Image: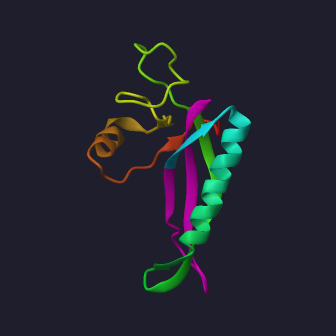
Amino acid sequence: MTWYGASLIFATKVVDGEQEKIPISEEVYLVHAPDDEEAWQIAKEIGRRDQLINDKVEFNGRVARREFLGIRKLRSIYNPVSMDDIDQEPPTNGSEITRSNFEVVGQESLDDLMNGKPVTVLYVDGAI
């Protein structure tokens, strides 16, 4: 069995009327499964359950719902290379849970990103 980090995407959408900005949340969950296909199914179920539990929310004083949009990516977890089996053993201190690959334009955007400021990014990593 392999451990995975599953990046699930959720959106907060108002129930009635138009909405200019839609808050998006990317949340990474641990999944333990025998293969990628089973891990994907488990991650989908986690997202569906989360949506049911956290369905009623509020956005800017308006009634809203939290919607599970899907899985953005699924990666097996890689333990430190000093371990015998880097993706089969349970995660431990120093394990890489997940990775995102994206681009920014220019040093100023890079500095803003590193300082926690809003910046436009182009995600370039795949779904799996």
Residue drawn at 49 percent across, 25 percent down: 78
Q: In the displayed structure, does residue 17 sit left or right of residue 116? A: right
Vertical position of residue 63 compared to residue 50: above or below: below
Q: How many marks?
A: 0
In x, y percent, where is residue 40? Answer: 68, 43
Q: In the displayed structure, does residue 43 sit left or right of residue 104? A: right
Q: In the displayed structure, does residue 116 sit left or right of residue 5? A: left
* Nearer to me, 88 or 121: 88
Residue drawn at 49 percent across, 86 percent down: 62
Q: How is the image coloured?
A: rainbow
In x, y percent, where is residue 114? Answer: 29, 41
Quarter holding the N terminus is: top right
Residue drawn at 66 percent across, 55 percent down: 45
In x, y percent, where is residue 102? Answer: 49, 37
* 45 part of magenta stretch: no
Quarter holding the C terminus is: top right
Q: Quadrant of residue 124?
A: top right
Residue drawn at 54 percent across, 23 percent down: 87
- The magenta segment is 1-27
Spot the residue most to the right: 37
Vertical position of residue 40 compared to residue 87: above or below: below
Vertical position of residue 17 compared to residue 128: above or below: below
* Nearer to me, 70 or 107: 70
Vertical position of residue 9 compared to residue 112: above or below: below
In x, y percent, where is residue 19? Answer: 56, 77
Our reading of the magenta stretch's main secondary structure is strand
Spot the residue most to the left: 115
